[in-house]
Image: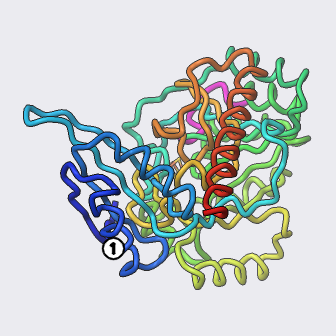
Amino acid sequence: MKLARSLDAGPRGFADGLLVELVGALREMNDGELVSLTSTRAATGPELLAWSKVTGHAIVTTTTTTTSSGVSHVWVVRKGEGVFGAEPSRPIGTRIWIYTNFDCNLRCDYCCVRSSPVAERRALGLASIRRVAEEARMLAVDGFYLTGGEPFLLVDIREIVETCASVAETTLLTNAMLFQGPRLERLRALPRDRVTLQVSVDSPTPALHDLHRGAGSWKKAMAGVRLARELGFRVRLAATVDTDEDERSFRSFLDAEDVAEEDRVIRRLAQRGFAEGGVALARGDLVPEVTLTANGVYWHPVGADDQDFFIQRDLFPLAGAIAAVREQWEREREHHDQLASVFHCA
Ligand code: SF4
């Protein structure tokens, strides 16, 4: 993580001058920059949390280490509110994100879940996905998002997609680089009805895309997009951008390609997983999206490899998993409202 400032508080708490020091550091920083605060005092955690909820500055990571010389706590605080979650809100649990696997043919330098060719597969498995779909049929789920890792590495990807699409609209996220041999046959065999392929393409030309995703990847991805369209798939293009300029240039490219508004996703780079730059995100910055992985239920797909986004181990019953996410969301909001009213009265 790129830090703008580091503060060593030792055993001091907010009442012993730490708050003044922290506020002073933030004054010298720009919105979105990070400051780390190291302390030997565990009670600083709740003080910092209450303060962050009132001020809107977010705690993006918390780490505790124990060594022979004692316990040390490090909190990383982002200046200002997050810019994610601007999407119109929808009832939590009406769409479900499924991490089919975590291994990938690429190793993008900003992959939010640390996927790569050497990452452990951690496949959710067809049997579990069938159960998710079956239970989702009884709930108000109207969409599945299948992601990874690269889902086309799985030999049973056709069965997985068929299972989900038989219940609800299904979007399959892919880098579109593996459409050869048996994998091409699996692509051909996928249903077209209620299935959208969402392909990662970051820039109008290879330069920026290849910089993050590897030499030659833009050309292969665009060939995959063309092939999928020829085979009759609805294809959505999804870009990860870091600046307003990158966003503008990608929009012009999509306009020139005549890509419909509903088939475009442009999102800011999130400082999660391998990413060293981008927006540092805390859980409270994001409206939750129920996310299922082989390791359990998570708050949002962007943090599906991070402990601070972990909700619970049990995926089933699915209604229970959705309820657990909703409950934690309610708690976040209640806490925020209570502290906000205390703040306003003071
Ligand atoms: S960002 Fe996507 S394509 Fe890149 S390593 Fe991660 S999962 Fe693979």
Residue located 77% across and 40% down the image: 188
Which residue of the protein is positioned furthest toward the front in this rendering?
346
Residue 293, relative to residue 320: is it above or below?
below
Q: Is residue 96 left or right of residue 91?
A: left
Q: Is residue 224 visible?
A: no
Q: Quadrant of residue 26?
A: bottom left
- Span of residues in magenta: 149-158
The image position of residue 58, as x and y in percent, is 50, 58
Front-most of 242 and 346?
A: 346
Kind of residue at disc 1? Ala
Residue located 69% across and 51% down the image: 337
Work out which quarter of the rendered image holds the C terminus and state it: bottom right
**Mark 1 Cα shell of 10 Å, populated few (<14), some (14-19), many (≥20):** some
The image position of residue 199, as x and y in percent, is 67, 56
Front-most of 134 and 88?
A: 88
**Is 64 contained in the magenta span?**
no
Judging by the rendered image, the residue that carries numbered circle 1 is 25
Circle 1: element type: helix
Front-most of 104 and 283?
A: 283
Q: Is residue 63 left or right of residue 195?
A: left
